């Protein structure tokens, strides 16, 4: 899940926030951590300033920038929760989302699994533990790869889980390398335009073995939000609404996949936003010290808007895409 706090850094209160976060970073990670965060902040803001939007480099830098904040307040999983019953804790719902996408990818019958946009490899670790497979994660964020390798080593699973920096639109693997692929709420982050979406799905088809399956989930929009709604989405998700307008099932089918199963889990993800608000309220003193009262209030106000915006405009496909066996 994208995190609100540092997405706001390029806004009107960026100087105040940057100073506060850098002080906290100095205490937690020293001068090297501060240098990494400053470099990421520049890389996030520059494409918007020069080109008016995101770039692949700025997406990686965005996650370099917000990873510490995400782990501090939400843990090691960077996706929305899936609440099939409605009463799950946030941690249970995050794991349930991982389990759902793994099941859609049919990883129980796979020896080698690719996790595209793998975050810190927390989902990959869970999949490897549950199914005994080998999981390779790819991430465009240098910081998430660095921290993910530490997480894997701490878990003692370096022999079965690997993470590397790479661009999912141009994967550095031979054709048919993997028995299954999981892409858990990462495609919209990776892809900044329509051509990127085509490249991503084409690469998934290429590196999946014939007969294999992709388990896929992602937040998308069916209709464009208003200008005010778009500002709230951009502040919290580092996306414009137009970038999220995507018919993912049709895109997979166009690239030769067979859609075996597809459901819309939007309503089962919306409780995540209430849990996010609860985190901020419960840790209000810490949030205020770290970001300042004015920005903390604005974050909460934006979080309150998101469920209604998504209920009006959103969709959240969770699907199984099958690569047919080759003829002959």
Image (cartoon, helix red, strand yellow):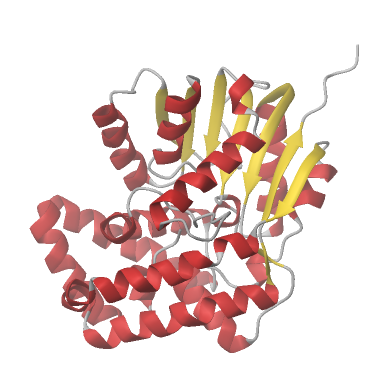
Q: Quadrant of residue 173?
A: top right
Q: Which residue sits furthest top?
A: 328
Query: Relative to 61, is 257 above or below?
Result: above
Query: Relative to 42, is 139 above or below?
Result: above
Query: Relative to 228, is 72 above or below?
Result: above
Query: Relative to 228, is 289 above or below?
Result: above
**Residue sitting at x 16%, y 76%:** 289
Instruction: Measuring from the top left, give residue 323's x and y in whole percent.
Output: 78, 29
Instruction: Measuring from the top left, give residue 306's x and y in whole percent.
Output: 53, 76
**Residue sitting at x 83%, y 43%:** 253
Q: Quadrant of residue 103?
A: top right
- The C terminus - image quarter: top right
**Residue sitting at x 41%, y 25%:** 161
Instruction: Measuring from the top left, give residue 118's x and y in whole percent.
Output: 47, 41
Q: Name the one closer to the observer, 169 or 25.
A: 25
Q: Is residue 168 visible?
A: no
Number of numbered discs visible in the structure rendering: 0
**Residue sitting at x 48%, y 31%:** 127
Asked whether, in this view, residue 156 is left or right of residue 254, the answer is left
Instruction: Measuring from the top left, give residue 98's x and y in whole percent.
Output: 51, 42
Q: Quadrant of residue 276?
A: bottom left
Q: Name the one closer to the observer, 196 or 188.
A: 188
Q: Name the one closer to the observer, 277 or 295.
A: 277
């Amino acid at each position: 899940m994208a995190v609100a706090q540092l997405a706001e850094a390029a806004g009107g209160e960026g100087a105040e926030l940057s100073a506060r976060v850098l002080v906290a970073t100095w205490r937690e990670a020293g001068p090297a951590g501060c240098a990494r965060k400053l470099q990421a902040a520049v890389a996030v803001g520059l494409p918007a300033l020069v080109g008016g939007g995101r770039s692949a480099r700025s997406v990686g830098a965005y996650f370099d920038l917000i990873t510490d904040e995400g782990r501090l307040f939400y843990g090691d999983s960077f996706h929305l929760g899936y609440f099939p019953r409605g009463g799950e804790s946030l941690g249970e719902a995050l794991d349930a989302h991982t389990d759902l996408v793994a099941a859609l990818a049919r990883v129980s019958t796979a020896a080698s699994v690719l996790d595209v946009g793998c975050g810190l490899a927390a989902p990959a670790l869970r999949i490897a533990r549950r199914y005994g497979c080998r999981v390779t994660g790819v991430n465009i964020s240098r910081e998430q790869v660095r921290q993910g390798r530490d997480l894997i080593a701490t878990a003692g699973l370096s022999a079965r889980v690997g993470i590397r920096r790479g661009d999912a639109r141009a994967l550095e693997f031979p054709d048919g390398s993997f028995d299954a692929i999981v892409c858990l709420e990462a495609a919209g982050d990776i892809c900044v335009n329509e051509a990127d979406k085509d490249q991503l799905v084409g690469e998934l088809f290429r590196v999946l073995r014939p007969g294999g399956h992709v388990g896929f989930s992602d937040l998308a929009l069916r209709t464009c939000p208003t200008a005010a709604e778009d500002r709230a989405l951009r502040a919290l998700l580092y996306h414009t609404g137009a970038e999220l307008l995507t018919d993912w099932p049709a895109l997979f089918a166009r690239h030769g996949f067979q859609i075996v199963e597809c459901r819309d889990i939007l309503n089962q993800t919306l409780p995540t936003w209430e849990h996010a608000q609860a985190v901020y309220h419960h840790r209000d003193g810490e949030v205020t010290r770290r970001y300042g009262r004015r920005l903390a209030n604005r974050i909460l106000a934006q979080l309150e808007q998101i469920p209604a915006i998504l209920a009006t405009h959103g969709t959240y496909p969770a699907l199984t895409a099958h690569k047919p066996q080759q003829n002959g």
